[in-house]
Image: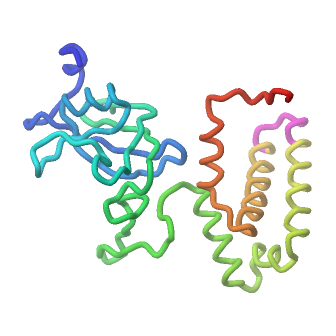
Amino acid sequence: MSQEVTTQFTFDEQGLLPAVVQDWLDGSVLMVGYMNQEAIANTLAKKTVHFWSRSRKRLWEKGETSGHTLHVKELFVDCDRDTILVKAQPVGPTCHTGERTCFYSTIDEQGLIVRSDRSDPAGGILDAVLRTIVHRREHPQAGSYTTKLFEGGQDRILKKVAEEAGEVLLASKGGKKAEIVYEVADLLFHTLMVLGYHDVTVQDIYQELGRRFGKSGIRTET
């Protein structure tokens, strides 16, 4: 790494800056480490995440012993240029405990740290909605719309998907953004119902989209 590049960053008095690692597919925060100039240079050159170990006082590649590496997709720096954000594709669990992410504990209302009771605390709103759907499937609740759909079986769920797809088409033809947003949200919810019915995770969908990313969508005739 050239001197011109390294002087763009604002390192602390130890020559380090924190690096936050996100899963490039769903934005889950996987871990936080520290980088110095050498770690940044190796991360850029080798396209795998490298850190400076403050305890061992040496450069290390994430996954160098476990094989659970982090393959770099994009690098960002914040406005003060003192924190790096790494978008990466993890190979296996990121945390040394075997969890997908190091952030698997929550802080309760009393300020106590407790292990999350979720099977996967990472991900965004789609993951959260799907977790609720699966919970309703396993623990039916009187008056719940989701429970009623499950009680109606697969055919009822699929009928709603078809209906909502039609509503999206009509909203798109109408050209009103608010209606498009509303109907697409309905379609996404009922599509998540299909995933919950079949025990398919949102992460499974992310993985498939990631596999396709950057590839031609045109299938060649055989």
Task: Look at 32% across and 54% down and name the residue there.
Answer: 66
Residue in the foreground of this view, choosing between 203 and 211: 211
| Image height of 140 relative to 177, above or below | below
* Residue at image point 63% right, 54% down: 204
| Residue 19 painted magenta | no
Please tell me which residue is depicted at 31% across the width and 32% down the height of the picture. Answer: 43
- Most common secondary structure along the magenta stretch: helix
Percent x, y of residue 154 = 86, 70
Picture layout, residue 168 above or below residue 193: above
Q: Which x, y percent locates residue 181?
A: 74, 45
| Horizontal arrangement in the rendering, residue 30 relative to residue 201 (left or right) | left
Left or right of 8 in this view: 108: right
Q: Is residue 152 above or below residue 180?
A: below
Name the spot of residue 137 as percent of width and height, x first. 71, 78
In the rendered view, how is the structure colored?
rainbow
Image quadrant holding the C terminus, namely: top right
Toward the viewer: 206 or 129?
Answer: 206
Q: Quadrant of the N terminus?
A: top left
Q: Nearer the viewer, residue 146 or 16?
A: 16
Residue 114: horizontal and vertical position, in percent?
Answer: 34, 75
Query: Looking at the image, is 141 positioned above or below residue 211?
Result: below
Which stretch appears magenta? 171-178
The image quadrant that residue 19 belongs to is top left
